[in-house]
Image (cartoon, rainbow, N blue to C red):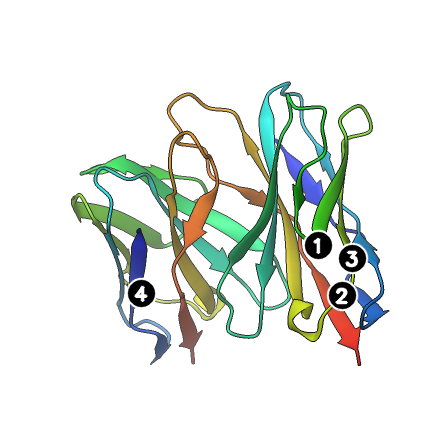
């Protein structure tokens, strides 16, 4: 079974600085997808960034970027120029490739990100 | 655009009472739908998924059940709630089979007393 591990229960960063959230996963699959979701106090789950395992290039979305190391099964999220609105729980998630699209997501336990003004 | 509605937003129920949580979606047809539970201080756990009307797959054995009576309706039920059923329940859909990510509804907070 796939597992996703987020080893940092909580991280704190000064506003405008850069922070990196760690995620490792365990799978025997070669094709899969990795995601970072953000959950603000409203508890709405919001997709931050997505990475396909077959792509070597790291995904980037504005201030958010990932460092995907397939051999090491590592998928970290870097947030540049941190803003107060970035404060939230961040979840790393995995989904095996499935032609039928039936597979659900496997989530880590989350990292609580605090932004210090 | 796709929209997910969940009802109710908040629910407090006594142990042993029945449960029915509803998820309805708009802006898509024949979606893959999912129920997740988020216990306090934990990540999300997949409970059920459905690829079509009447088709339900269970990921975790428990006293919960799910049904999909219509294409865009997904219901989570229980005949008798346990204290351990407390949590935040999220409905999700597969945004697009080409995109692979899931889009989540606003959730239902369930407290079993």
Q: Which mark is residue A80?
A: 3
Write down the quadrant of residue B33 in the picture: top left
The kind of secondary structure element at disc 1 is loop
Say if labels 4 and 1 share a chain. no
For the residues labelled 4 and 1, the Cα–Cα distance comes to 46 Å
**Quadrant of residue A112 in the image?**
bottom right
- Report which residue position mark 4 lands on: B80
Q: Return the residue at label 2.
A: A82
A48 vs B79, left or right, is right
B81 is higher (above) or lower (below) than A69: below
Q: Are marks 2 and 3 in contact (CB under 8 Å)?
A: yes
Neighbours of disc 3 within 10 Å: few (<14), some (14-19), many (20+):
some
Quadrant of the frame with the N terminus of chain A: top right
Q: Do the residues at pointers 4 and 2 share their chain?
A: no
Question: Tag 4, which secondary structure?
Answer: loop
Q: Residues within 10 Å of mark 4 (few under 14, many from 20)?
A: some
Q: Is residue B104 left or right of residue A27?
A: left
Q: Nearer the viewer, residue B68 or B28?
A: B28
Q: Nearer the viewer, residue B99 or B32?
A: B99
């Amino acid at each position: 079974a796939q597992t996703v591990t987020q080893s940092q229960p909580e991280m704190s960063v000064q506003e405008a600085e850069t922070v990196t959230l760690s995620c490792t996963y365990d799978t025997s699959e070669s094709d899969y997808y990795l995601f970072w979701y953000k959950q603000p106090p409203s508890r709405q789950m919001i997709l931050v960034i997505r990475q396909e395992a077959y792509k070597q290039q790291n995904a980037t979305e504005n201030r958010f970027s990932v460092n995907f190391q397939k051999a090491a099964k590592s998928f970290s999220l870097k947030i540049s120029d941190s803003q107060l609105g970035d404060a939230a729980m961040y979840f790393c998630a995995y989904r095996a490739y499935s032609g039928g699209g039936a597979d659900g997501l496997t989530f880590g336990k989350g990292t609580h990100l605090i932004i210090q003004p | 655009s796709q929209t997910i509605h969940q009802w109710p937003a908040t629910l407090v129920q006594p142990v042993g009472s029945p449960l029915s949580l509803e998820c309805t979606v708009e802006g898509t047809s024949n979606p893959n739908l999912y129920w997740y539970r988020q216990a306090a201080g934990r990540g999300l756990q997949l409970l059920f998924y459905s690829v079509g009307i009447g088709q339900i797959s269970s990921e975790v054995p428990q006293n919960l059940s799910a049904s999909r009576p219509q294409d865009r309706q997904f219901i989570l039920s229980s005949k008798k709630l346990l204290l351990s059923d407390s949590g935040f329940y999220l409905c999700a859909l597969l945004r697009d089979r080409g995109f692979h990510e899931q889009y989540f509804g606003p959730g239902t907070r369930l407290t079993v007393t």
